[in-house]
């Protein structure tokens, strides 16, 4: 008798669930195009810790990637050039709002030669590199190098993930 009730209950649950015609929780078809720095490598303050630079002082050069992403329901049908810039105002704002304080990373300790990325039509990603010279960085100081998306050819730049906060922490 118990098996019959369980079978009947399972049958009723299956037939009721088939009748549901709910709309999805988020309708991505209405979302526009947003240009962002992928959070997996530390985009935004939410991923601040992921953008920490850790390297040996004995290294002469190290590279960090800034991965640019087109976040949209469909890839664009045109190529998109995205301009980046060092945005020291973000460091100043961070210092005003947080206990940990960071100095600007001295120009002699990094190179940012290519400040644009181009995402081809039908694609979503491009990578820009920043080169660091660890042997020139004072390990006893906190440094920050915030990089922001400056221009995305009229597309919306993410408010949360439009910048990355590369930083070192004093040892």
Image: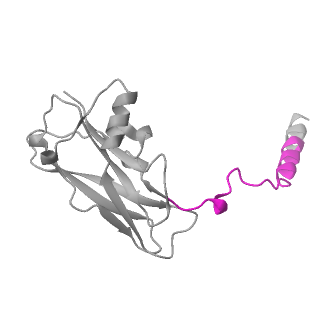
Residue 145 shown in magenta: no
Percent position of residue 18, x then y: 83, 55
The residue furthest top is: 99
Residue 142 horizontal side relative to residue 5, left or right? left
Quarter of the image for the C terminus: give it.
top left
**As displayed, is residue 12 above or below residue 83?**
above
Q: Please report the residue visible at 51 percent of the width from the left and 76 percent of the height from the top.
A: 77
Residue sitting nearer the eye, 69 or 110? 110
Residue 26 is a magenta residue: yes
Image side of residue 94 versus residue 124, left or right = left
- What residue do we see at 90% from left, 38% from top? 5
Residue at left offset 85%, top offset 39%: 6
Q: In the image, 102: left or right of 14?
A: left
Where is residue 48? Give x, y as percent.
37, 38
Question: Quadrant of residue 21 in the image?
Answer: bottom right
Could you say where residue 19 lies in the image, as x and y percent from the top left? 86, 54
Seen at 87% across and 49% down, the residue is 16
Residue 54 x/y as whole percent: 22, 39
Q: Is residue 99 left or right of residue 34?
A: left
Q: Using the image as rendered, state which of residue 40 and residue 91 is in the foreground.
A: 91
Q: How many marks?
A: 0
Relative height, residue 124 to residue 66 (above, below): below
- The magenta segment is 8-34
Q: Is residue 44 above or below residue 155?
A: above
Colour scheme: one colour
Asked which quadrant contains residue 137, the reply is top left
Q: Nearer the viewer, residue 20 or 49?
A: 49
């Amino acid at each position: 008798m118990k098996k019959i009730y369980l079978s009947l209950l399972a049958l009723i649950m299956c037939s009721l669930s088939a009748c549901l015609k709910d709309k999805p929780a988020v309708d991505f078809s209405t979302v526009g195009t947003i240009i962002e720095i992928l959070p997996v490598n530390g985009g935004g303050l939410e991923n601040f810790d992921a953008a920490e630079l850790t390297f040996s002082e004995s290294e002469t050069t190290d590279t960090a990637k800034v991965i640019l992403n087109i976040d949209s329901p469909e890839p664009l049908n045109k190529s998109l050039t995205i301009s980046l810039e060092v945005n020291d105002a973000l460091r100043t704002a961070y210092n005003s709002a947080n206990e940990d304080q960071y100095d600007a990373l001295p120009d002699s300790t990094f190179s940012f030669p290519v400040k644009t990325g181009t995402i081809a039509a039908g694609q979503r990603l491009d990578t820009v590199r920043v080169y660091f010279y660890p042997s020139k960085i004072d390990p006893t100081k906190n440094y920050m190098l915030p990089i922001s998306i400056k221009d995305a050819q009229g597309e919306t730049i993410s408010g949360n993930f439009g910048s990355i906060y590369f930083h070192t922490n004093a040892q």
